[in-house]
Every structure is written in C-alpha cells, then in structure tokens.
Amino acid sequence: MNNYETVFILTPVLSDVQMKEAVEKFKTLLVNEGAKIVSEENWGLRKLAYPIQKKSTGFYAMLEFEADPSVIAKLEINFRRDERVIRFLTFRQDKFSHEYALKRRSLKSSKKEEVKEN
C-alpha cells in the first residue's frame, strides 16, 4: 500500500450540498476499492490561477489516502467521467512528503484544540 494525495477542483456552479456530495462520491469509491482515507480537507471556493472552461473560480478538495496502485486508475477514470470535476492531480507521496503531511495534520489538530480551549 502506497500513500497518495489527490487534489481536485469542482465547478463553482455547484451548491455546498452538491459539492459535498461529489466529494463523498470519490471517498466512497476509494473505500469500496479498499483504500483507507487518512485525511480530507475542503479548501472551499478559490480563485483559479487561469480560467479553465471559462470559469475563474472552483471548489478545491484534497484527499489523502493509502491504496494499491490499481485504485488510482479507477479513481482518475471517474474524475474524467464526472462533469463536475474541472481539474485533478493525484500523486504518490515519497517519504519526505508523507512526513510533511503527518506534521501538517498534527499542527492542524493542535491548533483546533487550542481554539476549543479558548
């Protein structure tokens, strides 16, 4: 099992419910294929660096997961087939990026705990 991270951009014409539904679709696809979801982040509506399909904004989402390499092909086929997805990028984390991701997640969780205490 390798560690992977995928970031995808959804079209900005979706409502919040539709956006969350699309993210859930890809999460369940991964789980059904035997992947383990490690982290999920919704970055919200952001401005794109350049227009894609005449759109200047998009909903960004990031999933971090452990899976076999065969799962990636199925995930990317579903990204291509879904008209809500504007762009996507999936890559395998090497040991350095995996360590960085662990550090980033632990920092986030400690910040959340500080906010809850205050």
Image (tube, rainbow, N blue to C red):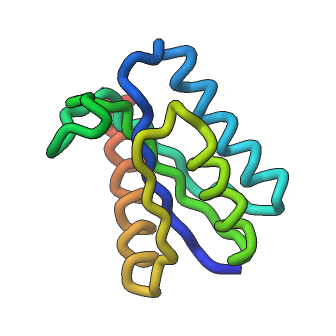
Is 30 drawn above or below residue 73 in the view shown?
A: above
Instruction: Point out residue 69 in the picture as x, y percentages from the top left corner.
Output: 69, 77
Foreground pick, 78 / 101: 78
Residue 43 horizontal side relative to residue 70, left or right = left
Number of residue marks: 0
Q: Residue furthest left?
A: 49
Residue beneath the point at 65% across and 67% down? 72
Specify the quadrant of the image occupied by residue 3.
bottom right
Instruction: Point out residue 49 in the picture as x, y percentages from the top left corner.
Output: 15, 45
For residue 44, say whether it is visible. yes
For residue 117, say whether it is visible. no
Residue 3 horizontal side relative to residue 100, left or right = right
Residue beneath the point at 84% across and 52% down? 32
Residue 52 horizontal side relative to residue 68, left or right = left
Which quarter shows the N terminus?
Answer: bottom right
Residue beneath the point at 32% across and 44% down? 111
Is 31 drawn above or below residue 51 in the view shown?
A: below
Which quarter shows the C terminus?
Answer: top left
Q: Residue furthest bottom?
A: 95
Instruction: Point out residue 15 in the picture as x, y percentages from the top left corner.
Output: 47, 12
Instruction: Point out residue 27 in the picture as x, y percentages from the top left corner.
Output: 67, 44
Residue beneath the point at 55% across and 69% down? 4
